[in-house]
C-alpha cells in the first residue's frame, strides 16, 4: 500500500482573506469553492484546503492560536529567495530574516499568513 499527501487543511476564521492571500501572493489557483465554507487551492503536487472554523472557535485570536501550532507549511522556490523576500515584504507579507546553515543546502525564510499560520520558503543553493 502506498500513501501520498494529496492535500492539507487549514481551519481558518476568514476564508476570503486567506484565499486572497494565497492566490495573490503565491499565485495558487482555486480549484473548488463553497462560499464562506471551503476553498481548495492548487499548490503544486499538494493542495491546500481552507475550511471555515467552527462557530465555537470564532472568538479565538487566530494569530495566537496559529502561533501555538506545531505545523509549518514549506514551499520550495526556484527563484532567488532574497529578491522574493524583498518583493513580498513590499507587499505587506510578514517574513523573518533568511537563514542558512553549514551542511544544509537551502536558504530558508519563515513567514506568517494573515491569520498567523506559519509557512517557510526555501531555496536550494549550490555549494561548490
Image: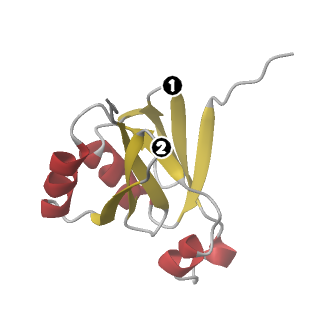
Q: Residue at x 16, y 60 (%)?
A: 91
Contact between labelled residues 2 and 1, with CB atoms less than 8 Å apart: no
Q: CA distance from mark 1 to mark 2?
A: 24 Å
Q: Which mark is residue 22?
A: none
> Quick check: 8 left or right of 94?
right
How is the structure coloured here?
Answer: secondary structure
Residue for point 44% across, 27% down: 44
Label whose residue precedes the other's in the sequence (1 or 2): 1
Locate the C terminus and report the quarter of the image it occupies. Answer: top left
- The vertical placement of 109 against 116, above or below, is above
Q: Nearer the viewer, residue 108 or 60?
A: 108
| Mark nearer the viewer, 1 or 2 | 2
Secondary structure beneath dot 1 equals loop
The x, y position of residue 75, in whole percent, is 43, 41
Name the image quarter holding the N terminus. Answer: top right
Q: Nearer the viewer, residue 43 or 76?
A: 76
The picture places residue 45, in percent across and down from the top left corner, at 51, 25
Numbered mark located on residue 104 in the image: 2
Query: Label 2: few (<14), some or many (≥20) within 10 Å?
Result: few
Element type at mark 2? loop
Answer left or right for 57 relative to 34: right
User: How many numbered marks have been drawn onto this rendered protein structure?
Assistant: 2
**What's the residue at 43%, 53% (across, down)?**
101
Furthest residue toward right: 1
Where is residue 97 drawn, in percent x and y?
A: 30, 65
**In which quadrant of the rendered view does residue 15 lie?**
bottom left
Rendered position, 84 above or below 76: below
| Residue 90 relative to residue 26: left or right | left
Q: Nearer the viewer, residue 8 or 19?
A: 8
Q: Rate crowding at label 1 as few (under 14), some (14 to 19) or many (20 or more) other CA atoms within 10 Å.
A: few
Residue tagged by mark 1?
A: 45
Picture coordinates of residue 127, whole percent (x, y): 34, 33
Amino acid at each position: 500500500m502506498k500513501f501520498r499527501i494529496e492535500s492539507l487543511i487549514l481551519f481558518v476564521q476568514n476564508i476570503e482573506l486567506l484565499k486572497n492571500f494565497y492566490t495573490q501572493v503565491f499565485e495558487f489557483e482555486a480549484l473548488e469553492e463553497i462560499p464562506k465554507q471551503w476553498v481548495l487551492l492548487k499548490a503544486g503536487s499538494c493542495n491546500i484546503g481552507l475550511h471555515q472554523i467552527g462557530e465555537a472557535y470564532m472568538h479565538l485570536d487566530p494569530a495566537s492560536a496559529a502561533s501555538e501550532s506545531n505545523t509549518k507549511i514549506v514551499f520550495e522556490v526556484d527563484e532567488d529567495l532574497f529578491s522574493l523576500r524583498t518583493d513580498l515584504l513590499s507587499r505587506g507579507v510578514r517574513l523573518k530574516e533568511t537563514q542558512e546553515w553549514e551542511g544544509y543546502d537551502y536558504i530558508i525564510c519563515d513567514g506568517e499568513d494573515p491569520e498567523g499560520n506559519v509557512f517557510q520558503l526555501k531555496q536550494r543553493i549550490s555549494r561548490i
